[in-house]
Image (cartoon, rainbow, N blue to C red):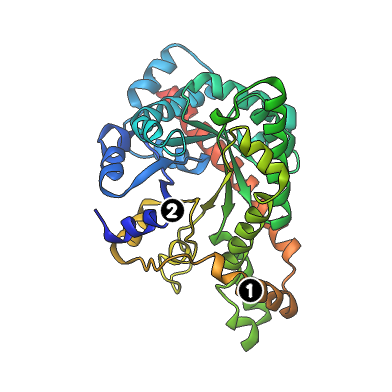
């Protein structure tokens, strides 16, 4: 067991794996990561599934059977992805039981082509919740404007939700309002709040990628000095917003009724710029009550040479505000950055979903 990962979990960070594949499940790799690398949850997305299906032959038998049954490509994709999610949920179930439902979670995303359609997202969330049928499931719903009422409705029906594709502080506050409203509506229906879990996936590395490109275009020494500062500062200020909301009477009333906090989850924590430390978004985002979902490469790097030194969020709020102010002064339009990132995120996941559909269609045609 890695001393670094022990330190990380000791400071209250849950380690989740940002990857899933049938090969990983069949080989026992997920169980090994739970045992050896402190992994207590799994997240998935359309890009991960598209990658998993394009490699190896782990899905061949199921694809053959689906082809013989002449199912549609959409039905085949859901049969394949939910099979993996159920399997992962069963592997993680002991963690779920041991933590009272806090960890041991696995996430599956609604069809990303529905990101701008509230009613269809709600219907998809209900269908996936029923289809997977595991208490330790999270339904991932994007934090688009249209996704916000879907988040509320899902939670109000007792469906646990992983809110994904959050980039901006303003939208994060709207997500927390949607979460609280959902809990209030569930309470009004008599649904026990203790059984409803949620996390808010705040994306990290993509912020630096976009902001750094804009700083390079500005090109001044002052601008270049600010590279690699935006993502961590943005995430730290998101946690400050979380603290503000969970100190309100509104939340305190729900907590007294048995509700659990919607934990901030740091997503997209693999470092994309090779000039930055490969554990940057692990080392610099440590505080209790958070989740860091990592690609396996980042997980291994954190285990090997992460620099886990204690709380690296709450003592640095002023530094974060100063960094964001400096970025604004140098000419970085924050609102435009987060708008571009949300649009790109929705488009990329939709493209990955289409790639997944195309791969499955091709495989069905071989049978």
Helix, strand or loop at mark 2: loop
Instruction: Answer yes or no: is residue 150 visible.
Output: no
Residue at the limit of the structure toward the bottom, as seen here:
221
How crowded is the residue under tag 1: few (<14 C-alpha within 10 Å), some, or many (20+)? few
Q: Which quarter shows the C terminus? A: top left
How crowded is the residue under tag 2: few (<14 C-alpha within 10 Å), some, or many (20+)? some
Residue 12: image tag = 2
Residue at the limit of the structure toward the top, as seen here:
69
Residue at the limit of the structure toward the front, as seen here:
256
Q: Is residue 71 left or right of residue 277?
A: right
Q: In this view, does 115 lie to the left or right of 262?
A: right
Query: Is 294 rendered above or below residue 73?
Result: below
- Number of marks: 2
Query: Is 322 rendered above or below residue 353?
Result: below
Query: Is 175 rendered above or below residue 277?
Result: above
The residue carrying mark 1 is 318
Residue 41: image tag = none
Instruction: Answer yes or no: is residue 332 visible.
Output: yes
Residue 69: x and y in percent read 45, 11
Residue drawn at point x = 44 percent, y = 46 percent: 18
- Comparing 316 with 81, the one in front is 316
- Comparing 313 with 214, the one in front is 313
Residue 76: x and y in percent read 49, 22
Residue 207: x and y in percent read 60, 62
Q: In this view, does 240 lie to the left or right of 12?
A: right
């Amino acid at each position: 067991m890695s001393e670094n990962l022990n330190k990380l979990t000791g400071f209250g960070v849950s380690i989740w794996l940002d990857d899933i594949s049938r090969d990983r499940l069949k080989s026992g790799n997920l169980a090994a990561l739970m045992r050896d690398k402190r992994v207590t949850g799994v997240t998935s997305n359309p890009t991960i599934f598209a990658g998993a299906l394009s490699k190896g032959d782990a899905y061949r038998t199921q694809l053959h059977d689906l082809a013989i049954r002449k199912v549609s490509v959409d039905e085949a994709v859901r049969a394949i992805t939910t099979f993996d999610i159920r399997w992962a949920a069963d592997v993680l179930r002991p963690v779920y039981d041991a933590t009272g439902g806090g960890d041991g979670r696995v996430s599956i995303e609604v069809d990303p082509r529905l990101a701008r359609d509230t009613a269809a997202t709600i219907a998809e969330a209900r269908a996936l919740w029923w289809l997977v049928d595991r208490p330790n499931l999270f339904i991932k719903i994007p934090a688009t404007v249209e996704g916000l009422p879907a988040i509320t409705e899902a939670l109000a029906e007792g469906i646990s939700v992983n809110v994904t594709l959050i980039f901006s502080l303003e939208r994060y506050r709207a997500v927390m309002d949607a979460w609280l409203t959902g809990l209030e509506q569930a309470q009004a229906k008599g649904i026990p709040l203790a059984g409803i879990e949620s996390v808010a996936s705040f994306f990290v590395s993509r912020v630096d990628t976009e902001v750094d490109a804009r700083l390079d275009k500005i090109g001044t020494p002052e601008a270049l000095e600010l590279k690699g500062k935006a993502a961590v500062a943005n995430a730290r200020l998101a946690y400050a917003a979380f603290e503000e909301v969970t100190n309100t009477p509104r939340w305190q009333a729900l907590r007294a009724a048995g509700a659990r906090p919607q934990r901030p989850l740091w997503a997209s924590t693999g470092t994309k710029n090779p000039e930055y430390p490969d554990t940057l978004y692990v080392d610099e985002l440590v505080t209790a009550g958070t989740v860091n979902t990592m690609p396996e490469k980042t997980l291994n790097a954190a285990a090997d040479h992460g620099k886990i030194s204690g709380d690296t969020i709450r003592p640095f709020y002023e530094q974060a505000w100063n960094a964001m102010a400096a970025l604004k002064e140098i000419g970085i339009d924050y609102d435009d950055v987060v708008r571009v990132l949300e649009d790109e995120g929705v488009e990329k996941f939709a493209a990955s979903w289409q790639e997944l559909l195309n791969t499955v269609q091709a495989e069905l045609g071989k049978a």
